Image (spheres, rainbow, N blue to C red):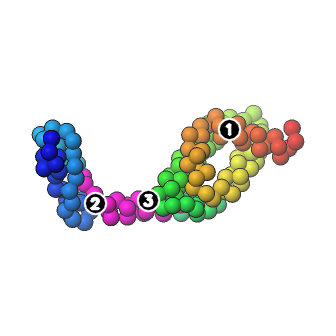
Amino acid sequence: MTDDISTYEVKCRTCRAKFKVQLFDSHDRNLFVVDKKDWYCDDCKKAYFSDQTLKLLKEQMTQGFHDLTGTEKMVSWAVKIRGEILNKVDYLKKSLRFKNEEEKKQSDKAFESLFSEWREKTEAKWWIDNRKMTVRDISKRAAELEALKTGK
């Protein structure tokens, strides 16, 4: 397949700017993709992801989390990861059942200890390195922090 066959001109859905893309399937399939897909130029993609990152960051700041340090791409990715991890914590908290009010208070303290630890993590790299954290990992860490705090 030559360059001419695999290079197609498309329009950005947002700003209507024309740009070229390379596709590597059959010509008929490529024409279908060119017609049906929503294309976005690099500037519009970057603006979209910046807006999404800012929106997530503002939401996280209401929970006491701070801005992250690192490259623009790392920060964008890490803010998304942090949001997913916070959703896992929310899921875990909603799924817990308690025998009495004392257990609930102890659980809330454990999660607050966990959040306190995480609020200190302001490097995007830390969130990226811990992106595979599961609900089980979160639960285990919250229990560890509570045990350290109470001395049990």
Q: Of the residues under marks 3 and 1, which one precedes in the sequence?
A: 3
Side (left or right) of 49 relative to 80: left
Image coordinates of residue 6 in percent, x first then y, are 17, 46
Element on which disc 1 rests: helix
Q: CA distance from mark 3 to mark 1?
A: 28 Å
Q: Residue at x 70, y 48 (%)?
A: 114
Distance CA(mark 2)–CA(mark 3):
17 Å
SS label for mark 3: helix
* Distance CA(mark 2)–CA(mark 1): 42 Å
Q: For mark 3, what is the residue?
A: 52
Q: Main secondary structure of the magenta part?
A: helix
Name the image quarter holding residue 62: bottom right
Query: Which residue appears at 58% of the width and 61% of the height?
Result: 68
Q: Is residue 5 above or below residue 79?
A: above
- Which residue: 58% across, 62% down? 69
Looking at the rendered structure, the kind of residue marked 3 is Gln
- Kind of residue at disc 2: Cys
For the N terminus, give its image quadrant: top left
Q: Residue furthest front?
A: 2
Front-lying residue, 146 or 133: 133
Q: Earlier in the sequence, mark 2 or mark 1?
A: 2
**Which-is-in-front pick, marks 2 and 1?**
2
Decide: few, some or many residues near mark 3? Use Cα within 10 Å; few <14, some 14-19, many ≥20: some
Residue 30 seen:
yes
In this picture, which residue range is highlighted in magenta? 38-57
Residue labelled with disc 1: 139
User: Which residue: 63% across, 59% down?
Assistant: 122
Q: Residues within 10 Å of mark 1 (few under 14, many from 20)?
A: some
